[in-house]
Image (cartoon, rainbow, N blue to C red):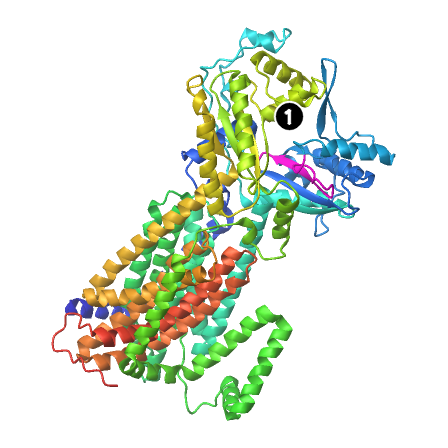
Amino acid sequence: MEKLFDSLNGYFAGVPTRVIRFKWWILLSTLALTLFLLFGALTRTSINTAANSFLDRSDPAIVALDKFRRQFGSDDSVFLVYRAKDGDVFSRRSLAALQTLTDDLENWRELGEKVKDAGGQTANLDELRHIRRVQSLSNLRVQSADGDTLHSNRLVPRQLPDNPAELAEIKAKALAQKDYRLAFYSPDGQYAAVLIQTDFGAIPVKDYVPKVNADGVALDDSFGDVAGGAETLKFDDSAEVQAIQYEKVDNFVYARFVKALKAVYQRYDNDFEFYSVGYPPLMEFVQQVLQQSAGLNLGMILINVVLLWVLFRSFSAVLWPVLIVLFSIVWVTGAVAWAGKSLSTMISLTVMLVFVCCMADCIHVISIYQARRQQGDHHRQALSDAYATAGLPMLITSITNMTGTFSLISSELYPIRVFAAMSTLGVGLAYLFSVMLLPILLDFWHPGVADASVKPGWPHRIANRWLALSTATRSVCTIAYVGLVMLALGSSVGGYIALISVLTYAVIRGQKRLLSAVPRLAARQFRLSLLLFGALVAACWYGESRLRIDSNVTELTREGSAIRVAYQTADGKMAGTQNMEIMLDTKTADGILDPKILTRIDSLQQKIAEKYPDKVSRTYSLANLVKDTYRVLNEDRPEFYRIPDSQTMVAQLLYLFNSVNPADRRGIVSDDYSQSHISVNVYSAGSSQYQAFFDEVNREIAQVFGDVKNEFPDLEVTLTGTVPLAMRTQAIIAHSQYDGFLLALGVISVIIFLTLGSVQAGLLSLIPNVIPALFTYGLMGLLDIPLDTDTLLLAPVIIGLAVDDTIHFMTHYRQTLIKTRHMAEALRETIEEVGPSILFTGMVLGLGFSIQGFSDYLGTAKMGIFGGLAIFVGILCELFLLPALLVAFKPKFGLKQVDTTINL
């Protein structure tokens, strides 16, 4: 094994010379491929964050949702809640404004160019072509009867009355409509809503051709005889229903639609205060988060640029690592774009992981290179020594990180499989560029060595003057600097910049003193170090036992943000922000007309409403419609608000209703009366609460419809909709991440054992790799912060950096121990050699990562904050815990005649 390591170190020592020999060929090839991949990334990249994009088309949840959309259209609606500024949505002023707004939304093509967006430009109203139906107080209909004649009249007449008494009558009549309350207006009359139904998720793919439009297909003669009425048409129960594949909706489409919608309704800001909720506004917010994330990533790069320059005092040490990171990201995104794969919000995590691995490799190489130059080596020799020292650990860390991310390739979720492939490729590219491109770039321009004969530059002169000041003066200046920065930039951003400044100064001033003290501390106080870290592990273990996996939309945005206020308003004043559908398919024409089926639909609604009042605001189905029609046709007597016992009576009621209001009938039951659905409005809640609720509803469904299975053996009752789909997705993400984490940890363990050639050393190396992730999740548990789909994905990034530093430390320690056969000398030299790069890597990546904490999306913000904390805990583990473990257990890596005396 020793000879193998020596030969590998010798191979990596020769890498710079070999690649520099072919530098022009490598540079030109890299540049050409980068331009090609950049073109693909800019022109072919698509981002899809829809809930149904995570699951396979064959997944039962997708099949159920597609079936619902095939019959009843999209469930992606905008619930536009508004508060009347005069305090009454039934006032003449409010009703007049609502009528005009509703007309504008229904007839948006007639608005022309007079509608401006928030930027003052003419709004692109063509995006509103996705509107399928608009419902509001101004066009709601209520039933009335004149003898045996059923009428469906507007709740609010088009010609609004001026008489306050007539307006009060309209209000009283509206508030008496149980099925409309909360859905379209609040019981106190201060809030109301416009329901805007869209075709998102129900648009067939571009190459879809309906079979009835295909060549050779013609309607038979029965369709020509329509004079006899609907009874002349017959439905063939055995007919094959053509499967339809629907287009996935790009986030940009949602964003453009909501932008156009805002341009229309914000013209009524003088009358109303709007709160827009629903899936399209939520996706628009996600699009804004992605754009903000791009800005935060640029901020992360800027922070890294500043820190790299301060730490290395060389612009080449800044430019080349950033360039290699950009090359790696362009190559991986370009490759995915040319492969025709859609990206998800997980692209940001891939970028972070590639950034971490690439930056860590570059910092290790440049740190060792600069140390060798300061020891007197010439440029090429220092470059060769840097790769001889760091080359093997870089290879091992890249393999472990690639293995860890590739372990997720078996996930049920498509975006996680894409993330696994992208991250594996990205980490591999980061290593490839660090080995093949970085030596060439450093050969062109590399960090210099301080020359005593050259007059110091302005940074050194300022530093010398600063150090000449007294400690008290420096303290006062530091406090004044922190205060001025916070005053100028605000407490959050200013405090963050001040923190970066103070930490950077502390590392630059104290790194030599700190690193020289670490070996002595490890030798003398290793028991104390183990005790302190043991206490930390125990506390985190307890915190992790309290950790819960939960995701609540309203809690993933900052307090006071527009979307959070909108969701809170819709939950508090109206029917809630979420909905689910219970789809019924009897597989029999007229099956839904059977009183047994309708009675059980009504019974299920009542059970759900009574048992879950804290989750369900209202339910609506064909049973409501039938009961209301039956009551209206019987002089509004309350005893007739029920399901008739006769199927003939049910059919007659629906025939009458269909004749006066066909749009509402089609929205709730299929033309052959074989399929229907129950709409359930629910309040916002955490995913764990939703999942338990869905399980209970499914049990209620099985119980309520169990006794009609003999009569309707093919009856299917399915819980579906965007919310159940999202909850299933989150559950799969949670389990796949947990399983992937364990698999990755197992694979990484095997690789470390093989690399170090010692089970004991391998087990010791795993401890500092696990603690940062344990600390992150344990702290979240102690603070009662739930683990969501974003923070679940932190593990690969945290382990990636921890493994990188651990392997650099342990391989260097092993190599030094092979040479010296003296543990104390190996420990001292390892900390002296690897310690600076561990400090620099942790600072650069930890502070850069933490900038994500400023994101408006709290999922990303938590990733930034807890990820940054985990990186700093990782530094402590590498510099204090790992040396203490080596001193305590004294692994020999299978070597003989090793002096285990540690006296520093």
Farthest residue to the front: give it.
639
Viewer-nearest residue: 616 or 436: 616
Q: Give yes or no for residue 187 being in the magenta stretch.
A: yes
Tell me: residue 479, above or below residue 258.
below
Would residue 38 be seen by someone viewing this image from the given angle? yes
Tell me: residue 689, above or below residue 391.
above
Farthest residue to the left: give it.
896
Q: Could you say where residue 400 lies in the image, as x and y percent from the top left? A: 30, 59
Q: Quadrant of residue 95?
A: top right
Q: Could you say where residue 277 lies in the image, as x and y percent from the top left? A: 62, 44
Horizontally, residue 411 falls left or right of residue 12, namely right
Q: Could you say where residue 709 lies in the image, as x and y percent from the top left? A: 43, 21
Tell me: residue 447, above or below residue 616.
below
Would residue 438 be seen by someone viewing this image from the given angle? no
Horizontally, residue 763 falls left or right of residue 444, namely left
The residue segment tinted magenta is: 181-201
Q: Amino acid at mark 1?
A: Asp
Q: Give yes or no for residue 186 being in the magenta stretch.
A: yes
Image point (63%, 13%), residue name:
652
Residue at mark 1? 664
